[in-house]
Amino acid sequence: MEISLKGDKEFEEIPSIKTKALRINLNEHIYGTFAEIGAGQETVRQFFRAGGASGTIAKAMSAYDKDFSDAIYGMEDDGRYVTEARLHKMLDHEINLIEERLTRDKHPNKLFFSYANTVTTIDFAKKYKGHGWVGIRYQIEPNQDYNEITLHLRFKENDARLQQETLGVLGTNLIYGAYYKYNEPKKLLRYLYDHLDKDQLEIDTINFSGPVFEEVDNRLMSLQLVKNGMTDAVMFAPDGNNVLPARVLYKKNILALRGSFRPVTKVNMDMFQRSYDMFIKENKVDVEKTQVVFEITLSNLRAEGEIDEQDFMDRAKLLCSLGQTVLISNFQEYYKLVEYFSQYTKSRMGLAMGVNNLVDIFDEKYYRHLSGGILEAFGKLFFKDLRVYLYPMLNDDGSITNSENLKVHPRMKELYKFFKYNGKVVDITDYDESNLTVFSRKVLKMISDSEDGWESMLPEGVSKLIKEKSLFGYEAEEVFRNE
């Protein structure tokens, strides 16, 4: 029997939280459990208070005691409780219980779900504002496999009670969206903030899986988080799944490369490899605890007007195919990127960049919004344990520009010298000269104009992928031969 979730009469454009909970409660088919740890039972409370909950809530629980929690869900290898792994164990356990305790013979039309969260709210010293994992595993057809939406949030409020209430609203929005907006995942993302302000919480990771989300690319969902202002940066791994930046960057040495990567070229990979070889030889750099990040800024994605999502996906696929971790950020200035990394590590950091990028860093116009101007920005950028690895530039006359002869604005000359001669800027000297004539924009134009020879400017395997997937507007030419 097919159960329709789309046929219900639509409520007002932004239904209240009570209305959302009541609509779920009044749907006779939706039935499941709530398991909440760390911030009260704030989500299920919305459903109890809305009325009609007896037909929806099979069980609500909170295993606050760690021993009880371990006895129910098992122990984590790292001994932590507010983790993605913990959330998945909670969802696994609770869904299995529903399936064990309720037979399909007796409940042929029920759409089972399990909602779970594991969070920590602000501490008494107000030093750590708190964060958490929230998720739902659910069906939209009785005999269909389960779908899943999981997300990570960071609280911004300075009061534990307010954070609890915020969590309850978010949880209700998630459950409502999962059932009534699953066919429009981009809208579902935006609706998570119904009756919430971006000053209350940040969502920095989200993943969709299951039969109704087969066509959803989680990298594209990551982009929406930044695009919608839900977070300043998101990260995805080479496998294409979104990952929590804190988990990847925590206490790591970080080497970052910013670029358009449209497409990624040999010069990008040469810059990466040469700077990496130099970085891991630095004092205080442990190669086992080093993370390389390829970063694309939102302003770069908007370089030609509105964000072209297909163009973004083309870049992402190529970087992932090369085994790279990608960060999409809203940080136009480098000092903001370094500040962001500094949230997670105090270890040494490196930035690999070309000459033009370094010249831009020393341009005052980018810092007029700061009360302390460029000096404030440089204090945030260079007082950290950071070093810039500079890739040279080939000039039209055949000469090379590097850190020794690059020209900054006359007012910035002494400032530049200060950082240069204090070892904050070092030249990449062992580079491949043949790459100095390679530019992404040139390759892109050759692809769009169907010119020959662009393949040799790209890393091994990249041109093949561009052709196979028809990336960046590549069109395969069919050749007909008369035998």
Image (tube, rainbow, N blue to C red):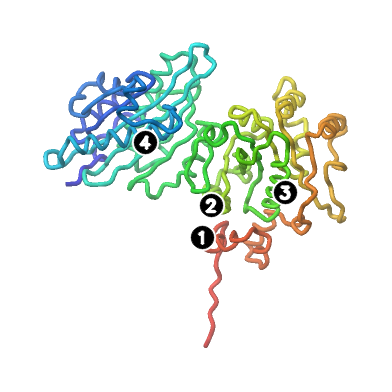
The mark found on residue 469 in the picture is: 1
Query: Label 4 sits on what residue type?
Result: His
Q: Nearer the viewer, mark 1 or mark 2?
A: 2
> What x and y, as percent, mark residue 446?
66, 62
Residue 142 figure quarter: top left
Q: Which residue is mark 2?
A: 317
Which circle's residue, 4 or 1, is located before the other in the chain? 4
Query: Would you say the residues marked 4 and 1 are in contact, meaning their CB atoms lie under 8 Å apart?
Result: no
Residue 68 figure quarter: top left
Question: Residues under labels 2 and 3: Cα distance?
Answer: 23 Å
Mark 4 surroundings: few (<14), some (14-19) or many (≥20) residues within 10 A: many
Q: Nearer the viewer, residue 255 or 72?
A: 72
Residue 111 figure quarter: top left
Question: Residues under labels 1 and 2: Cα distance?
Answer: 10 Å
Question: Residues under labels 2 and 4: Cα distance?
Answer: 27 Å
Which circle's residue, 2 or 4, is located before the other in the chain? 4
Which circle's residue, 2 or 3, is located before the other in the chain? 3
> What x and y, as percent, mark residue 3?
21, 43
Outermost residue, top direction? 124
- Height in image: 181 above or below 19? below
The mark found on residue 274 in the picture is: 3
Question: Residues under labels 4 and 1: Cα distance?
Answer: 33 Å
Q: Which residue is mark 4?
A: 88
Q: Nearer the viewer, mark 4 or mark 1?
A: 4
Say what secondary structure mark 1 lies in: helix
Which circle's residue, 3 or 4, is located before the other in the chain? 4
Say what secondary structure mark 2 lies in: helix
Query: Label 2 sits on what residue type?
Result: Lys
